[in-house]
Amino acid sequence: MSQPERPRRVTLADVARATGVSASTVSRALSGDPRITEPTRAAVEAAAAALSYIPNAAARSLRVRRTRTIGMLVADLADPVHGQIAAAFQAEARARGFTVLFLAGYYDHEVERRALDVFLEHGVDGIALLSGTLGLHEARSRWRPDRIVVVQPDQRTGGTARGRSYGAPGVIRSDDAAGVTAAIHHLVATGRRSLAYLGVEGRPSNGIRRDTARAVLRDNLPEAPLHVVGLSSEAWHDPDAVALALGEPLPDAVLCYNDMLGLALMDGLRRRGTRVPEDVAVVGFDGIPFTALANPGLSTVVTPMAQLGALAARTLIEAIGSGTMGPELTLPVEFIVRGSSGAGAR
Amino acid sequence: MSQPERPRRVTLADVARATGVSASTVSRALSGDPRITEPTRAAVEAAAAALSYIPNAAARSLRVRRTRTIGMLVADLADPVHGQIAAAFQAEARARGFTVLFLAGYYDHEVERRALDVFLEHGVDGIALLSGTLGLHEARSRWRPDRIVVVQPDQRTGGTARGRSYGAPGVIRSDDAAGVTAAIHHLVATGRRSLAYLGVEGRPSNGIRRDTARAVLRDNLPEAPLHVVGLSSEAWHDPDAVALALGEPLPDAVLCYNDMLGLALMDGLRRRGTRVPEDVAVVGFDGIPFTALANPGLSTVVTPMAQLGALAARTLIEAIGSGTMGPELTLPVEFIVRGSSGAGAR
DNA sequence: TTGTACGCGTTATCAA
DNA sequence: TTGATAACGCGTACAA
């Protein structure tokens, strides 16, 4: 009974035949063309439903040269930060009638270049770059610059001077520098005197966080320069190694590149008997939900992930419609103090 | 200088003109047809590169009726479990030359139905369903049953008898029942006597975990039936409420539907002064990385997320190639004991 | 070994 | 208000 005679897809012509009109009438009726008479439209719609007609997106986009599809290049779908931004992006895009094609780049330049090609082959109407190694500059040299947005780029896009950046349309970023500044101020104000920065090598956003931390600390505590340590992106899987990487003597406060590293550091310190926050204060970055559930809670700079994603989609889709890309947008971050950087005792 | 004169896309014909051959020769040369002479191929490739020719996927798929595209319907991209599975799925698909179109369903049936339509419009070669409310049955009634895989379905797909399931080709699942069984055995064996299950309403996989827990407990501790509590999917944002939901008197062990709930419960108990694991043992489910970093570490049933995703992609793509869908596959889970369910003291 | 001709399913133009 | 026709860019059967 389940003969493999592949059931050829129902087309406009089939609906036309069933209704007794021409294919163009069906096309117009289904696209809501106002000059189709009401009974005709009703008949067409009934037939389309009865045959469960599904329009062929390939044929349409071949004809109209638009796909209502956006390509989003994500560094790593398994990363909660990227996942949250991607989810918000897709939700906003969907609300505006766009479909999102996701590709992961895994911080591999070759993969990312290839992903761009895939987007172009599929004729996307716009492209969103989320983290990763592909610079805005390179992407824009390969395709229409007015249809690419970048979320959270390196500080080197556009000019940047101490957190104030200017002139890079299509860039949606969070104010990492302000977040780092707040964190350092907090640590110094609560009596911490030897600060370290635990970074992740090769992440574009690592640079601005580290450099800002260094600069702010220099302004506030000139005699004790920032101790900088760089780890691999997978380092947080091994808490002991993370704690060990800090070296001796231990600093009394550590700002981490992201929350996972912060959580791993807390665990590593705990395992060697160092108390957080009494001996060492720990601050993370990103504001993933688990920071609130940790014991003690992890102080962190909260990136507005949902807004970043939604705003990126909105900006891109409006640019697709209008032909001009909106200006660079910087969203504020929030620094949340929790137990991991509590003042001394408690 | 940046005149908006849209730079018409380079086509096969353009490359042909530049090379001085016909379009079909270009097509053959670029697709590696063996009967194209070497110098011709080289010339074509040079011209294609020089013009930065990008093939038009819409035109191709219109012609060959294949897109080498797979649609994956994910319940929630922001959920770490789904993100991990999706990432592995995409990686495997990419390695086999397929592009993945992701859509999120947010556990909304209407949205999921619409997502299916989008996939069909785009002419995907296959569909993967990850969690969500859309049953395998409904999906298969709307499209080619032999090109749909489901990851982690409700236990009601196919027949299931105490963890043994049979006869549902295209289903890739983890052995949740075995994981729950191991967890309950562990809790009973370490002296816990009043057990509770903290579930999430409306999640397909909640049923099998809860029912298995109840059945296994009945077999092992008939005099103390499982205390079942159902929470909303967002409940974990409020740790106090989660702890409160357990009621009085507190059970001495709680199995949670997922790790987020487990982490929230630990935090909520801590905030009201209840000790984990001394007073209450807590066990999570999924094995997200944060369980290892929590304090104490959260015991959990580890779902093989990466394998689930990769295997789903492999199964689906092989079915697309061969025309027959492989049998149901159940991957083993691992139960990891950590501090949160330690025996009594420590 | 290469070129010619056709059709995939749609929409837009033009004519009726 | 509706229908016939052409074209979007590609792959392939057939002819050369």
Image (spheres, coloured by chain):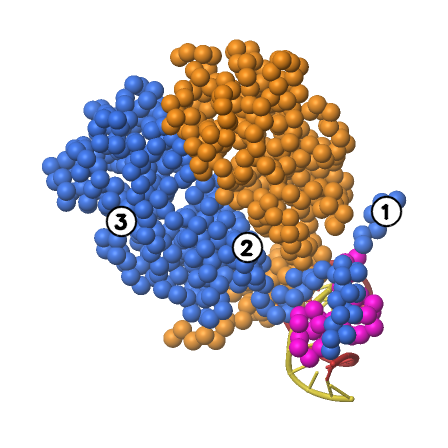
Chain colours: A orange, B blue, C red, D yellow
What's under tag 1, amino acid-wise?
Answer: Gln
Circle 1 residue: B3
- Give how far across and how far down residue A251 sits, in percent: 51, 20
Both labels 3 and 2 in a single chain: yes
Q: Secondary structure at mark 2?
A: strand
Image quarter where the C terminus of chain A lies is top left
Of the image marks 1 and 3, the number of the one nearer the N terminus: 1
- Can residue A100 be seen here? The reply is no
Which contiguous range is marked in magenta?
B8-36
Of the image marks 3 and 2, the number of the one nearer the N terminus: 2
In the image, which is nearer the foreground, mark 1 or mark 3? 3
- Give how far across and how far down residue B110 sits, in percent: 47, 47
Question: Relative to B318, is A91 on the left or the right?
Answer: right
Q: CA distance from mark 2 to mark 1?
A: 35 Å
Both labels 2 and 1 in a single chain: yes
What's under tag 2, amino acid-wise?
Answer: Val
Q: Quadrant of residue B27?
A: bottom right
